[in-house]
């Protein structure tokens, strides 16, 4: 068991080093210069040279990489070029709003997607099934930022029901919730479409399995068959899709954050990429990727809890 | 050389098989809608210069933001360009993005995935590690960084999106190859002394291709959405190129007064994504009903 | 002999500041008094990055800094006249080389950084001059020989030679903002985002990409604000910001650019849309060392080919002004007599191109991906295509754009020099050889240095205007830079905002604002 955990941690570490390495060299490949970005239009040659030396940008790239790795191992991901604050501090500040959006978006997605998928599967081939699948197809077909724009036009502009800004500057749970409704719905709807499709096909497969047929033949009520027997078995592929769509919805979250002027990891990293804020991008990508990897590890453990047969592998 | 009876029989049998396959496709409503929908779109894209009532780039500042009329079906944008013509020409760009992204990511992903699935040993472990690392990146973010790196021309956007979505195809390919590897015909080719590369190219890839093609269809849709997303963030294809993403982004500033500009471009994208998905679903059902499980997870 | 020179209105500010709350309260409804909720929310289009006066640039940074810092003197928000800030008065020696300022007593730095003294003034300017600081504005203080501090409330500047424009350099903007020796030394590396000033607001916190919070400085020497707090919210999209303003999620809409949004907000009940000519033009800078652009006829042909009138009336719907040179009418030194103009005349453009024997000319306009700069060049490129120039537009996101422009390897680019109403700001930046790349003189123009030096030596405004007029005539004749339009600033605010004054600096300052119940 201990060996298993150690192995997991080892793999995680390798994955994270890999991710950071990709991020490091990708950022260096981007033309542009953080010093120039910092000093802007009136930068003088000497001022640029001074700042570059201070930032360690005058060293060869491979040397910068090892300096970076050496410090990263000690938990120091450098300081943001733009703000002068530790990069990790900056990134942590962006995590809560991102997590709130991701979790509430996922909640919306599951609440909408799973029942739709189950209903469609139970009524396979009926008008309900076709309607649900068409709606689900629509949900993944519109650009997420476009849905956001339409939502602002409808619910903020025309109806005045929800704020156009997806985050409030005042504290307070209810205010925050009120601001969260539109972004969470927009993000959730796109993911719910995937979840509905996946739930449907997983349910269809399970409903055709022998023990369900036997249960049905023995006169177990249909409601009980669907929710107790079939759904339980269909849960694993549904959980799997949550894991897979998580990374993808983080990508969509960048757009949702942009439409609704929300703070978050996505917009922080986007801004850092455009500002050539190397340290911030590296730290952000690291946190983001770690979240994805950890979520998937957690889901693997959860499968084991749901279905003991999976534990052995 | 005259045909023997066996040959005629074989030909007839093959013809019958082809007819059966054809029927299987035509009887699938989703596939038919998808295929016709795509065909229509390709037609519009090819005939754009003749269908479009105006030039998609010619500006007329004194006639900007005009409402829809007989001459300008969907009105004009902030430069006085015909929105309808821009959408019609935009089909060309969007289809190019979809097609080339799929072409590139499919070729790269297939080879990487097949090698990763077939090779075994440290090659497999290394490739799988790299694929996993890249899968942990939100691919849209990866595409975004690549566009920032290479500049926002059409070519570099296509390349960026393709690279960003390659790991996904590679992952599907590998998982399919894993199911093929233990099959007898692979054993047999190894027994007759074919080199691993030849086995991968001649047997593994062709046999694993159907599920990957399904994923590819959907990737085309994802690529079109990604292009639109990049335009929205200001990293889209250079103006004045008419892309649907650009039309949405450019129409955004006048969305309260002239909502038709952004709305119609959004609908064009949605239409394309819907028909591509229908086509993909149709292909999945008809190519191989069993592979639902293999591909479903990654869509 | 000591000559006392005081611009009209000098000292008025102090009087006004003492009774600020009362005066404003009387003039505009009733300010909300006491018990919390006095938070003003201002929209920003993009994020801040840097609040150190030695390195500061960009409107958003400067807007925040203008709330935090004071200068010796400042531009009056409404009139652009130079009025006192922390200095109570100044004297200039007869030869114009020694400037002595008396400082206001009992001023303290924010967050307990102690009393403000003349030593801080000396430190602030010497820091800008020190090459190790890497200040962007070192050149602005060229000719400053020494700073003396005879006592804590007196500071003296000794110049190499008389400079009638010297007061501009000390104004509360960029290098003119004063910093605390103790704060800068103690905070060190992190100072740029932990600024300490003496102004009406104290920097509280910044959430990247989201908001900047300031709180009122109760000890402000000009009288504390009636607001408790100001929040600058970053809302990129103007349509969303306009909806938020209507829904009262925001109070002030800064950096209002889009003509359609301006038109719409003007029709909204309760929303006031203010506008003012800016101190800058937006220009197409041509590289005069590259290919056909070396030929003056080609540059003139381009000016004739571009329909700048249609750009202003059609694309911008009349929200911008025509530009005749890179100076705008907001400058005291502005003049247009004898300055050549280039009317829209495609035939003339074609003729000039034929004369220059130019064909198959590929021309690229490099521009930045910020509204409206990523858009309007499309129309210009289209105009150029009509006369046979194969013009294209290349939009780069800001980082890549700054890189491309400072490399100097661009055929042309869109450049606007936003700044104070000091003519040197656009003229030195665009025409002086000192500003050759990485500076903004990407045309590599080299015939303006002598005239600029002559203007600096000119004894008074009239003489300066004369020299600048010669410079404008010459540069508009040589045409290394084609002015496209003169900018105009729009700001909108909701019904609860009272006492707001819009400036022409492209910044927003809410120091005099109060909130009233609607």
Image (cartoon, coloured by chain):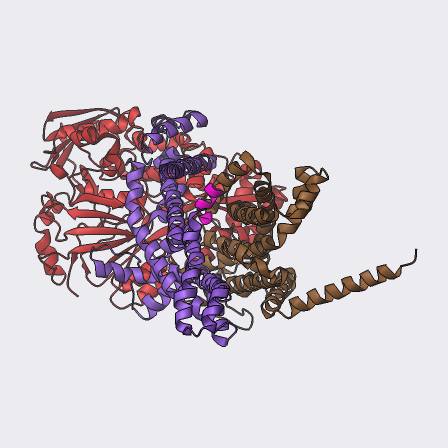
Q: Which chain is brown?
A: B
At horizontal 33% and vertical 49% (from top left) the residue drawn is A264
At horizontal 73% and vertical 39% (from top left) the residue drawn is B192
Compared with A143, C58 (above or below) is: above
Compared with C89, B83 (above or below) is: below
Magenta includes A127?
Answer: no
Quadrant placement of the N terminus of chain A: top left
Q: Considering the whole magenta stretch, tell me its main secondary structure.
A: helix
Q: Which chain is red?
A: C
Q: Residue furthest bottom?
A: A127
Q: Which chain is purple?
A: A
Q: Residue furthest right?
A: B1
Picture quarter containing residue C235?
Answer: bottom left
Residue nearer the viewer, C451 or C242? C242
Direction from residue C241 to residue A133 in the image, left or right: right
* Residue C395 location (% of width, % of height): 48, 46
At horizontal 16% and vertical 29% (from top left) the residue drawn is C182
Magenta includes B139?
Answer: yes
Compared with A66, C14 (above or below) is: below
**Do we see residue C421 in this rendering?**
no
**Do we see residue A47 in this rendering?**
yes
How many marks are shown on the rendered structure? 0
Q: Which residues are magenta?
A: B132-140
Residue nearer the viewer, A184 or C23? A184
* Residue A5 location (% of width, % of height): 37, 39
Compared with C170, B230 (above or below) is: below
At horizontal 12% and vertical 56% (from top left) the residue drawn is C36
Residue nearer the viewer, B293 or C50? B293
* Residue A278 location (% of width, % of height): 39, 36
* Residue A246 location (% of width, % of height): 41, 52
Direction from residue C349 to residue C183 in the image, left or right: left
Picture quarter containing residue C165?
Answer: top left
């Amino acid at each position: 068991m201990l060996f298993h955990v150690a192995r997991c941690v080892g793999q995680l570490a390798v994955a994270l080093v890999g991710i950071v390495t990709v991020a490091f060299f990708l950022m260096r490949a981007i033309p542009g210069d953080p010093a120039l970005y910092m000093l802007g239009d009136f930068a003088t040659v000497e001022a640029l040279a001074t700042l570059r030396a201070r930032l360690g940008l005058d060293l060869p790239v491979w040397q910068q990489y090892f300096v970076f790795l050496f410090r990263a191992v000690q938990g120091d991901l450098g300081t943001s070029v733009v703000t002068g604050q530790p990069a990790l501090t900056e990134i942590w500040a962006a995590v809560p709003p991102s997590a709130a959006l991701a979790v509430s978006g996922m909640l919306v997605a599951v609440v909408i997607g799973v029942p739709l998928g189950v209903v469609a599967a139970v009524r396979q081939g009926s008008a309900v099934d076709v309607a649900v699948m068409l709606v689900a197809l629509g949900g993944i077909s519109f650009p997420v930022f476009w849905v956001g724009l339409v939502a602002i036009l409808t619910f903020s502009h025309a109806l005045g029901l929800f704020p156009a800004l997806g985050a409030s500057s005042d504290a307070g749970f209810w205010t925050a919730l009120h601001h969260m409704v539109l972004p969470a719905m927009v993000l959730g709807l796109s993911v719910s479409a995937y979840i509905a499709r996946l739930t449907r096909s997983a349910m269809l497969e399970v409903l055709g399995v022998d023990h369900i047929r036997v249960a049905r033949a023995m006169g177990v009520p249909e409601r009980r068959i669907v929710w107790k027997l079939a759904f339980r078995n269909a849960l694993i592929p549904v959980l799997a899709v949550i894991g897979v769509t998580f990374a993808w919805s983080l990508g969509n979250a960048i757009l949702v954050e942009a439409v609704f002027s929300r703070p978050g990891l996505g917009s922080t990293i986007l801004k850092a990429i455009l500002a050539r804020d190397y340290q911030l991008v590296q730290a952000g990508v690291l946190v983001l990727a770690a979240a994805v990897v950890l979520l998937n590890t957690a889901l693997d453990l959860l499968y084991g809890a749901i279905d003991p047969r999976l534990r052995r592998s | 050389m005259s045909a023997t009876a066996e040959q005629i029989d074989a030909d007839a049998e093959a013809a019958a098989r082809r007819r059966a396959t054809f029927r299987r496709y035509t009887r699938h409503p989703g596939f038919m809608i998808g295929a016709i929908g795509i065909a229509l779109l390709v037609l519009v894209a090819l005939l754009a210069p003749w269908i479009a009532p105006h030039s998609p780039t010619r500006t007329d500042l004194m006639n900007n933001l005009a409402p829809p009329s007989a001459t300008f079906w969907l009105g004009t944008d902030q430069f006085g360009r015909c929105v309808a013509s821009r959408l019609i020409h935009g089909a060309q760009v969007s289809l190019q993005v979809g097609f080339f992204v799929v072409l590139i990511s499919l070729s790269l992903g297939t080879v990487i995935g097949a090698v990763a699935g077939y090779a075994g040993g440290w090659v497999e472990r290394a490739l799988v590690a790299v694929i996993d690392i890249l899968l942990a990146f939100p691919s849209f973010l990866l595409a975004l960084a690549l566009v920032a790196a290479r500049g926002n021309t059409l070519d570099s956007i296509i390349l960026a999106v393709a690279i960003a979505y390659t790991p996904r195809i590679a992952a599907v390919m590998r998982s399919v190859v894993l199911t093929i590897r233990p099959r007898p015909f692979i054993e047999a080719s190894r027994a007759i002394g074919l080199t691993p590369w030849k086995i991968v190219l001649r047997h593994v890839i062709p046999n694993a291709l159907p599920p990957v093609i399904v994923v590819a269809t959907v990737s085309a849709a994802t690529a079109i959405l990604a292009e639109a997303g990049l335009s929205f963030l200001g990293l889209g294809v250079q103006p004045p190129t008419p892309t649907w993403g650009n039309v949405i982004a450019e129409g955004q500033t006048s969305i309260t007064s002239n909502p038709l500009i952004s709305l119609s471009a959004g609908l064009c994208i949605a239409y394309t994504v819907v028909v591509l998905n229908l086509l993909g679903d149709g292909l999945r059902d008809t190519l191989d009903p069993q592979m639902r499980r293999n591909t479903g997870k990654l869509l | 002999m000591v000559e006392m020179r005081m611009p009209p209105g000098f000292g008025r500010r102090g009087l006004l500041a003492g009774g600020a709350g009362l005066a404003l309260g009387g003039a505009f409804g009733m300010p909300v008094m006491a018990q919390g909720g006095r938070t003003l929310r201002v929209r920003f289009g993009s994020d801040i990055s840097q609040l150190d006066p030695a390195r500061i640039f960009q409107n958003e940074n400067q807007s925040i800094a203008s709330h935090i810092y004071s200068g010796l003197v400042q531009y009056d928000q409404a009139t652009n006249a130079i009025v006192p800030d922390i200095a109570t008065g100044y004297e200039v020696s007869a030869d114009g080389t020694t400037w002595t300022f008396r400082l206001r007593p009992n001023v303290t730095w924010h967050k307990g950084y102690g009393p403000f003294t003349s030593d801080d003034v000396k430190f602030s300017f010497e820091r800008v001059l020190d090459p190790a600081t890497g200040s962007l504005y070192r050149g602005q203080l060229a000719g400053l020989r020494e700073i003396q501090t005879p006592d804590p409330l007196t500071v003296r500047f000794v110049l190499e030679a008389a400079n009638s424009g010297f007061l501009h350099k000390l104004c509360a903007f960029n290098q003119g903002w004063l910093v605390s020796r103790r704060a800068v030394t103690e905070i060190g590396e992190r100072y740029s985002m932990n600024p300490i000033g003496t102004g009406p607001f104290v920097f509280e916190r910044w959430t990247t990409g989201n908001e900047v919070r300031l709180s009122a400085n109760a000890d402000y020497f000009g009288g504390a604000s009636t607001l408790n707090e100001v929040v600058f919210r970053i809302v990129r999209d103007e349509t969303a910001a306009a909806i938020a303003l209507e829904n009262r999620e925001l109070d002030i809409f800064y950096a209002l650019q889009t003509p359609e949004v301006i038109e719409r907000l003007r029709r909204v009940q309760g929303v006031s849309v203010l506008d003012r000519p800016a101190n800058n033009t937006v220009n197409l800078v041509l590289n005069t060392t590259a290919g056909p652009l070396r030929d003056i006829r080609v540059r003139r042909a381009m000016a004739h080919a571009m329909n700048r009138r249609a750009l202003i009336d059609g694309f911008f719907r009349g929200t911008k002004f025509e530009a005749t040179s890179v100076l705008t009418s907001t400058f005291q030194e502005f003049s247009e007599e004898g300055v050549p103009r280039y009317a829209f005349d495609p035939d003339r453009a074609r003729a000039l191109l034929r004369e220059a024997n130019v064909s198959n000319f590929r021309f690229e306009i490099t521009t930045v991906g910020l509204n409206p700069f990523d858009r309007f060049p499309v129309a210009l490129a289209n105009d150029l295509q009509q006369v046979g120039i194969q013009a294209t537009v290349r939009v780069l996101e800001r980082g890549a754009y700054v890189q491309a422009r400072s490399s100097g390897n661009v055929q042309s680019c869109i450049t606007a020099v936003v700044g104070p109403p000091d003519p040197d700001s656009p003229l030195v930046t665009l025409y002086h050889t000192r500003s050759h790349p990485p500076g903004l003189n990407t045309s590599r123009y080299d015939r303006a240095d002598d005239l600029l030096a002559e203007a600096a030596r000119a004894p008074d405004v009239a003489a300066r205007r004369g020299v600048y007029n010669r410079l404008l005539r010459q540069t508009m004749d040589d045409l290394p830079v084609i002015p496209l339009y003169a900018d105009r600033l729009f700001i909108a605010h909701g019904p609860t905002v009272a006492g707001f004054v819009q400036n022409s600096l492209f910044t927003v300052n809410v120091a005099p604002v109060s909130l009233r119940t609607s």
